[in-house]
């Protein structure tokens, strides 16, 4: 009997955990509209709606909505709790949930199993319609690291021919060196000079200030004199990085988002911490076609001439790079603003990616095969297959450099391309545009 009860409890716990991860943390809705949400989950229970800000939102199942702008009138049973309006309605998440929104505001929805067991709390934001310009142009990305990034630890050959590795087990790849003694360092050259000067003043241990996993700490290292007479600590470092990508959008305030994923260091695989950077025009020279096991790529160059400057990079995050546009950027943008389509509006089937492959900005057809609104894979919420014949002939599908290409469906921008399947370049992933916009 005890085993049976334990088994039942275990099954319920696993069920709650599984369903909880498939329900998004946040749902964004346009004000004054009827929104349909399909969770397609094996869940029968209760949704409790609790007002956070002054707004009106009604919830029902199967399209049976009673609309009323009164703050006290809801579909379902209405009670008062902590001075906030609360309503509850029984739902089957295999059916369509209709939400009739009112004015802008925020709500907390709580999903309960059997009306008793709390499974998930969801923040629902009712907001004004958002418009952004979907871009799709290739851009050159130049990022300055926040300090000097350590990419590897090495041995130093001393004057007597022996070797030592002063930084071994003290400094790690991925660390960012920002100080030597009391001197701040921002470039490789400044690091070399600071270490040399510290030994000229007083030979011995030197204090290195660095960031590791976002936390500042100080370590002590004894520099050694190399065969060329210079003092070294045995680190390979980098103070900037460059690459090509695709500009995703520009918003109404002149802010841009690109890539849909962060820029990682090629050696450490970690997101590069940046103190800023710049966006430039990129010139595409050729296309390396993708094939199974060998992703293709865009071959191009960055034009660093001031006349091709496009904007300031302010953030490098795991969902894209962000910054402020220069006025110069608008001469390269041919499209107009489109409304943002939230994840619950996305349909399986035909959509388009906007990209710059054949010398002009074009829309190429894809087929959306699945949508994952869970919280685990925010860079891979959209799965799709390339169906456009011209794109398949020229690139083989999705290739490196197309990251950030906006995804458009039903006249709305819904996401951006982020990844390609290595063994099948015709298949790729995208991030929801609402996830990218959360950074702005």
Image: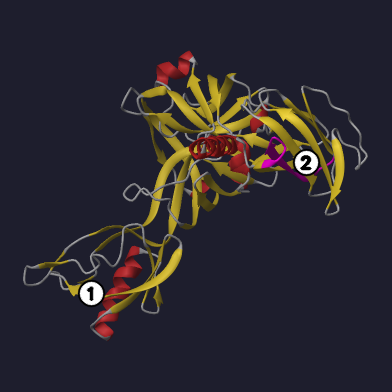
Taking the view exactly as shown, the residue that stands out farthest to the right is: 70
107 or 296, which is in the foreground? 107
Considering the numbered disc 1 on the image, is that residue within a helix, a strand or a loop? loop
Q: Quadrant of residue 25?
A: top right
172 or 206, which is in the foreground? 172
Taking the view exactly as shown, the residue that stands out farthest to the front is: 1
Q: Is disc 1 surrounded by few (<14), some (14 to 19) or many (20+) residues within 10 Å?
A: many
Q: Earlier in the sequence, mark 2 or mark 1?
A: 2
From the viewer's perspective, tell me whether residue 397 is left or right of residue 69: left
Could you say where residue 39 lies in the image, as x and y percent from the top left?
64, 28
Q: Quadrant of residue 172?
A: bottom left
Q: Residue beneath label 1, please?
A: 223
Could you say where residue 92 lies in the image, as x and y percent from the top left?
70, 26
Could you say where residue 96 lies in the image, as x and y percent from the top left?
71, 24
Residue 106, disc: none
Q: Quadrant of residue 231?
A: bottom left
Of badges 2 and 1, the one in the foreground is 2
Q: Which residues are magenta?
A: 103-117
From the viewer's perspective, tell me whether residue 14 is left or right of residue 210: right
Q: Write the residue at 33% across / 51% down.
A: 268
- Cα distance between the residues tagged 2 and 1: 63 Å
Q: Write the residue at 78% across / 40% down.
A: 128
411 or 205, which is in the foreground? 205
Q: Is residue 194 above or below residue 12?
A: below
Q: Residue beneath label 2, please?
A: 49
Would residue 127 be visible to someone looking at this image? Answer: no
């Amino acid at each position: 009997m005890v085993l049976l009860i334990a088994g039942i409890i275990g099954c319920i716990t696993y069920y709650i955990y599984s369903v909880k991860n498939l329900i998004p943390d946040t749902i964004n809705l346009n004000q004054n509209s009827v929104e349909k949400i399909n969770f397609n989950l094996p869940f029968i229970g209760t949704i409790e709606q609790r007002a956070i800000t002054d707004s009106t939102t009604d919830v029902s199942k199967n399209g049976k909505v009673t609309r009323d702008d009164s703050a006290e009138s809801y579909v379902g049973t209405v009670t008062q709790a902590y001075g906030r309006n609360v309503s509850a309605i029984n739902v089957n998440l295999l059916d369509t949930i209709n939400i009739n929104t009112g004015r802008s505001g925020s709500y907390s929805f709580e999903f309960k199993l059997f009306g008793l067991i709390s499974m998930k709390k969801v923040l629902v934001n009712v907001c004004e319609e958002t418009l952004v310009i979907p871009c799709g142009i290739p851009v050159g990305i130049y990022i300055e690291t926040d300090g000097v990034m350590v990419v590897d630890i090495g041995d130093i050959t001393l004057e007597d021919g022996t070797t030592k590795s002063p930084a071994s087990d003290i400094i790690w790849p991925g660390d960012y060196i920002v100080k030597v003694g009391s001197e701040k360092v921002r470039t490789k050259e400044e690091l070399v000079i600071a270490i040399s000067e510290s030994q000229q003043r007083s030979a011995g241990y030197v204090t290195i200030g660095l960031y590791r996993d976002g936390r500042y700490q100080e370590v002590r290292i004894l520099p050694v004199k190399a065969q060329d007479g210079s003092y070294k600590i045995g680190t390979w470092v980098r103070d900037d990085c460059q690459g090509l990508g695709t500009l995703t959008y520009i918003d109404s305030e002149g802010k841009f988002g690109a890539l849909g994923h962060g820029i990682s260091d090629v050696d450490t695989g970690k997101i590069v911490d940046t103190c800023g950077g710049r966006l430039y025009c990129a010139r595409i020279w050729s296309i390396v076609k993708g094939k199974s096991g060998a992703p293709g790529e865009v071959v191009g160059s960055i034009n660093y001439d001031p006349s091709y400057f496009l904007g300031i990079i302010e953030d490098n995050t795991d969902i894209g790079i962000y910054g402020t546009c220069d006025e110069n950027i608008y001469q390269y943008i041919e499209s107009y603003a489109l409304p943002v389509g939230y994840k619950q509006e996305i349909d399986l089937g035909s959509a388009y990616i906007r990209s710059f492959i054949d010398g002009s900005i074009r829309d190429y057809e894809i087929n959306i095969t699945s949508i994952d609104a869970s919280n685990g894979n925010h860079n891979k919420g959209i799965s799709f297959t390339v169906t456009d014949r011209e794109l398949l002939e020229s690139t083989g599908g999705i290739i490196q450099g197309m990251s950030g290409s906006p995804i458009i469906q039903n006249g709305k921008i819904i996401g951006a391309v982020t990844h390609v399947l290595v063994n099948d370049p015709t298949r790729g992933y995208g991030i929801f545009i609402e996830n990218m916009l959360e950074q702005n």
